[in-house]
Image: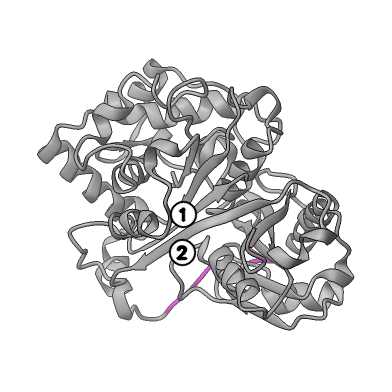
Amino acid sequence: MNTRDAFVSGVGQSEVGMRLTRAPLLLTLDAVKEALDDAGLGIDQIDGVSTYPGKAHGYLGFSPIGADELIDALGIRATWYAGGGEITSQLGAVAAAAMAVRLGQARHVICFRTVYEAAAMSRPEEFPPIRREKVEGYTQWTAPFFAISAACWTAQYAMRHVKRYGMTREQLAQIALTGRANAALNPRALVQKPLTMDEYMSSRMITSPFCLHDCDRFTDASTVIIVSAGDALDEVKATPIRIAAMAGAVDRLSWDQAEWMACYATGPELWKRTDYKPKDVDTAQLYDGFSFQTVAWLESLGFCEVGEGGRFIEGGTRIARDGELPLNTFGGQIGGGRLHGFGFAHEAVVQLRKQGGARQIPGDPKLAVAASGGGPLATALLLARD
């Protein structure tokens, strides 16, 4: 083991729900406590904090807690910390922490993502919605047409696959059906009722080809990943999971879309940084804010050829828990809740440690890929149990 390697030493998660009344800082502290207990670390051993995208003062439901607020609340003596939105996507905060411990800037870093959108929408007097007198920047191309949701631009990429490669709604449905089947076995999942193909096909359309069940839903929760340096693992009690490789890409943040989503540049870059290959992966935890984003990740990471994603998931057997590539075993964001990227890294660690309970995949999983982002931003982590 290289002492400068970065490892996930602990994971934690708060209650996951909609319109929760527990304050977002307290949800964050709940997740931190669980992660510290998991790792066997004390708060006095934490010397770094990393988050995405930092506190969003103009939209507190999206990101109500910043790195500095957590540092102050817990009295962390940080030698390194970061929090911002101008990175490769949500899991870019974990990648930044990994680089920090590799460089000796910190030994144990708390990485967290806290979301509070459902609660904020239900209590606008506490969390006022965004109000602008004018539109500017790239919002000038979206807000006047009520195209505020990321569903609008993601659907355009999906329709290209429908028109160019023949992807069908029945194929796309397998992302939601698989996620919901797995969520039914996850006691923390937001939606624990399995979904049928008839229910999927008859649900209302949102923006073609997406129906209601292709979209995640606003969630209140906090997820924590602790990243530790290799030379600090003697302080850790849990099975460490090595960050074997990581990659990220950013395209222009514009309504004038690039031809391909940023994941298509990220996937090949990940495999350049490791001797592992796609065939070595035991489970994939891939972003599904909208179902097609998972299809794009499957293609970009080389699990199938570009344009073959629909056929790869057809029937759902290949991506089932007992299939050749178990996918989004906690339910993904569609079933497990919109944990905004961090849930995928959390679940990868759970599966590699064989702590998944009823949703645990069979065999002896040793390698997982976790990915976040689905448009102009993308991050992929390759996690290994050595």
Q: Where does label 1 land, which residue? A: 372
User: Does the segment drawn in magenta span residue 130?
Assistant: yes
Say above or below: 190 vs 116: above
Residue 224 shows up from this direction: no
* Rendered image quadrant of residue 210: top left
Q: Earlier in the sequence, mark 2 or mark 1?
A: 2
Magenta span dominant secondary structure: loop
User: Does the segment drawn in magenta span residue 248?
Assistant: no
User: Which residue occupies 50% across, 71% down?
Assistant: 130
Three-letter amino acid code at disc 2? Ser
User: Which residue occupies 61% across, 54% down?
Assistant: 242
Q: Where does label 2 land, which residue? A: 89
Q: CA distance from mark 2 to mark 1?
A: 6 Å
Name the quarter where the N terminus is drawn: bottom right
User: Which residue occupies 39% across, 57% down?
Assistant: 270
Q: Nearer the viewer, residue 256 or 277?
A: 277
Q: Position of residue 228 (x, y in %)?
A: 71, 64
In this rendering, position of residue 380 left or right of residue 148: right
Say above or below: 265 vs 239: below
